[in-house]
Amino acid sequence: MPNNKGRKRRFGSIRTTPLGEYQASYLGPDGRRHFAPHRFKKQRDAEQWLNKVELEIISGDWTDPDRAKITLAVYADKWISERPGLRPRTVELYRWLLRKHIEPQIGAVELGKLSAAVVRQWRAGRLEDGVSQSVTAKAYRLLRAVMNTAVDEDKIVNSNPCRVRGADRESPEERPVISVGQVFDLAGRVPVRFRAMVLLGAFASLRFGEVTALRR
């Protein structure tokens, strides 16, 4: 018969299973018993896992592992819905980024398993698939903001995996500018009633709404 008692520990407990493996568990700060995510082949490995958890509790870095099982897609959708002060256009942009560029690739990943390597590979995959650097940067910033909340406010994970240097920067291509000759050529091609609009838009730096709002 395997010995399920073992020696008494200061923190946590280790029991031997009928298969000769070691199962580690502990009472968390929430008063509930938590088990290691897997069983160990060696007792020493189980002890090291418990030592690591104990240090996290002492340092205040402990998080409930059960809460970290929520998927990124579910948490991010909830984050957008509950985020205060977002304008309707911003909400629309965030939901599009989540639906198009985050959820299909890494949406099923649990927050506790979302590592820096996963984020780095996701970003590289977006760029390899032809997504522009600007859109990829927007999606990355959204992901980073979501994970900041998971770390700082909800205490679901210990650290933010979004640590790709420069990934949040956009480098949009410079917009082409037509020449003076091209402006006059364009004005000569449109109906007469639109010529003043073309010239004012080009030389007076008026926006479309401002030009069309002008009256005699």
Image (cartoon, rainbow, N blue to C red):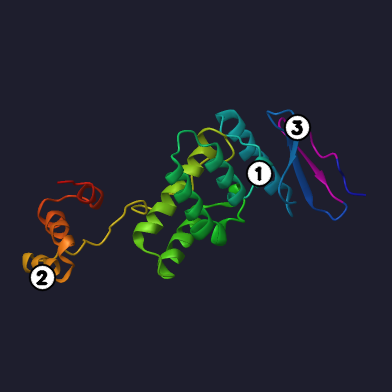
Queried whether the magenta region covers residue 126, the answer comes back as no
The secondary element bearing badge 3 is classed as: loop
Q: Residue furthest right?
A: 1
Q: Earlier in the sequence, mark 1 or mark 2?
A: 1
Q: Residue at x 34, y 58 (%)?
A: 134
Real-space CA distance between mark 1 and mark 3, rounded to the nearest whole angstrom? 18 Å
Dot label at residue 185? 2
The residue pinned by badge 1 equals 49
Q: Earlier in the sequence, mark 1 or mark 3?
A: 3
The residue pinned by badge 3 equals 32
Real-space CA distance between mark 1 and mark 2, rounded to the nearest whole angstrom? 75 Å
**Magenta-drawn segment:** 5-17
- What is the three-letter code of the residue carrying label 1? Trp
- What is the three-letter code of the residue carrying label 2? Asp
Q: Main secondary structure of the magenta part?
A: loop
Q: Nearer the viewer, residue 85 or 145?
A: 85
